[in-house]
């Protein structure tokens, strides 16, 4: 894929935004992991299967986990684009 340097810069900036958002979400999910004693992936498995209660914190945790997953997916797409880029000679 051939892109202008300005577009590559924008993609790199968006990747940095993704990483910052992921960091904040990981901090928030980390607090819940410590509180309840499960890693987030295990919590999502249990919550999705209906094996734990319906505490309000669980709904918040699930929303945080989904947001984190979406940001990770977006970062992956951006990384893929950036790894396949060729700069246009301007």
Image (cartoon, rainbow, N blue to C red):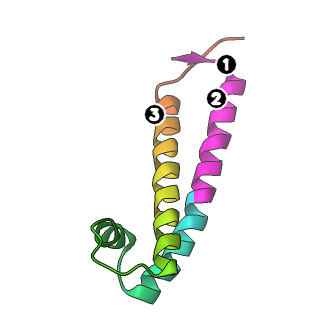
Is 21 displayed left or right of 32 in the figure? right
Query: Residue under circle 2?
Result: 8
Q: x%, y% of residue 5?
A: 68, 24
Residue neighbourhood size for the residue with mark 1, other residues' Cα within 10 Å, grouped as few (<14), some (14–19), many (≥20):
few
- The correct choice, above or below, for 8 with respect to 41 in the image is above
Front position in the image: 83 or 44: 44
In the image: residue 17, left or right of residue 45: right
Residue 85 falls inside the magenta stretch: no
- For image coordinates 41% across by 86% down, the residue present is 36
Disc 1 secondary structure class: loop
Image coordinates for residue 70, horizontal then vertical, percent: 49, 50
Q: Give the answer, above or below, for where 17 lies relative to 24.
A: above
Quarter holding residue 9: top right
Residue at horizontal 50 percent and vertical 29 percent from the top:
81
Residue 2 magenta-drawn?
yes
- The answer to whether marks 2 and 1 mark residues whose Cβ atoms lie closer than 8 Å is yes
| Among the two numbered marks 3 and 2 on one chain, the one whose residue lies closer to the N terminus | 2
Q: Which residue is mark 1?
A: 4
Q: Secondary structure at mark 3?
A: helix
Percent across and percent down for residue 52 are: 32, 79
Tell me the CA gap for discs 2 and 1: 7 Å
> Can you tell which of label 3 and label 1 is closer to the viewer?
3
| Residue at (35, 80) in percent of width and height | 38
Which numbered marker is on residue 25? none
């Amino acid at each position: 894929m051939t892109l202008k340097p300005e577009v590559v810069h924008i993609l790199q900036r968006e990747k940095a935004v993704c990483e910052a958002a992921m960091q904040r979400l990981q901090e928030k999910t980390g607090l819940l992991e410590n509180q309840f004693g499960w890693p987030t992936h295990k919590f999502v498995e249990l919550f999705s299967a209906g094996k734990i209660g319906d505490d309000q914190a669980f709904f918040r945790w699930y929303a945080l986990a989904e947001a984190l997953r979406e940001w990770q997916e977006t970062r992956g797409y951006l990384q893929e684009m950036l790894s396949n880029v060729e700069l246009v000679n301007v």
